[in-house]
Every structure is written in structure tokens, then in C-alpha cells.
Amino acid sequence: MAFDTDHSKMDCFVCCILAHGESGGRLFSTDGTAFTLSQITSNLTANICKSLSGKPKIFIIQACRGEEVQTARNYCADAGCPGGVTIPDQADFFIGYATVAGFKAHRHRTEGSVYIQTLCGLMEEHAEKVDIQRLFIKLHALISRMEFDGPPGAPWKVKQIPEVKHTLTKNFKFA
């Protein structure tokens, strides 16, 4: 298990999960077993996995989070630790979800996940130049401009917006 491993020489922990998911945060392994992200992250908190204490723990989740589809509307808009410092156990997590809770994540039939494909392209171009928050803002902007076919027979297009949750206590950039 990750908490039994010495991560003291590592700068961060990265985990990518590409799975099926549903409302309530349940994800499914290839054998159909349900699990939640908190079952993984709870083993990496500072009090359990001390060698990752104070280090970013990055999670990229490509999975649906429900059955709803997002639609679009036109609108107008106006133009390193010094001694003695403690951190919360749940600090320094970064979780990038393909979509917001309750909604589907879209994928191309042959090219795969638009979220993962777009993220990989951005990382190749920008990962060493910008911090992870700015990288994901770029990702969200690109995905939000995409349109996907609606349900079979529907005459409209649907949208997708990723979501980020984090408790980072400092900027993080891939080097």
C-alpha cells in the first residue's frame, strides 16, 4: 500500500483513475467492484502516510458522476516547512474531475476521453511553465467550449465542464 512506502525522496504523488462512475461519488473497477475516492485518499493523509506529508497528492478522475447532461445557454456578460509548522491531515490534495457531480463525462468513440486527451495536450505544452491551477483553468476553458451530441435522436448539443477540488497549501508545477 502507498502508506507503507517511503516517499521521502518524491516531490508529489499522482494517481489517474479512468473508470465508470455514478452519482454519490461511486467509481467502479474493471471487475465491477464499487469504491470511492475517499477510500484511496484517506490512506494518504499526513497522519497515515507521513512521507507524503506536505507534498501534493494529485488525482485525475475520468468518470461520470451521474446521468444528467449539461446544456448551454446564450448569455451576455459585463465586460517546504520550517521547523515547528504543522499542517492539517487533509492538506495538499488536488482532485481534477472530468465533470461536475451529477453529470456525464463525454468521450469520443475512437479517440477516448476528451478530458484526458485535452489534459495530456495541455501538459505537453504548458506543464513546466504554469502551476497546476492555471493549467486546469486552461483545461476547463477548452472543454467548456466543446459541444457533444445529445441523447440519441435529440436535436441539441450538450456541454461538459470539469471540476477541481483542492486543499493545496502552495503552488505546484510539474518540472
Image: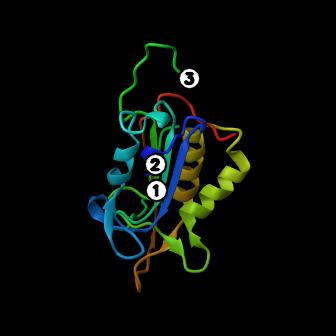
Residue at 42%, 35% (x, y): give it.
Answer: 167
State the image quarter where residue 34 is shown.
Answer: bottom left
Query: Which colour scheme appears in the figure?
Result: rainbow
Tags 2 and 3 touching, CB below 8 Å: no
Q: Position of residue 38 (x, y in %)?
A: 33, 50
Determine which of the numbered discs, if any, sits on residue 80 in the image: 3
Q: Nearer the viewer, residue 160 or 167?
A: 167
Residue at 54%, 61% (x, y): give it.
Answer: 115
Q: Nearer the viewer, residue 21 or 68?
A: 21
Secondary structure at numbered mark 2: helix
| Mark 2 vs 1, N-terminal side | 2
Is 39 on the left-hand or right-hand side of 15? left
Q: The C terminus appears in which quarter of the rendering?
A: top right
Disc 3 residue crowd, few under 14, some 14–19, many 20+, Cα 10 Å? few
- The residues tagged by marks 2 and 1 sit, at their Cα atoms, a distance apart of 31 Å
* Tag nearer the camera, 2 or 1: 2
Q: Is residue 66 visible?
A: no
Is 49 on the left-hand or right-hand side of 171? left
| Mark 1 vs 3, N-terminal side | 3
Residue type, label 3: Gly
Task: Residue under label 2, please give it.
Answer: 2
Residue type, label 2: Ala
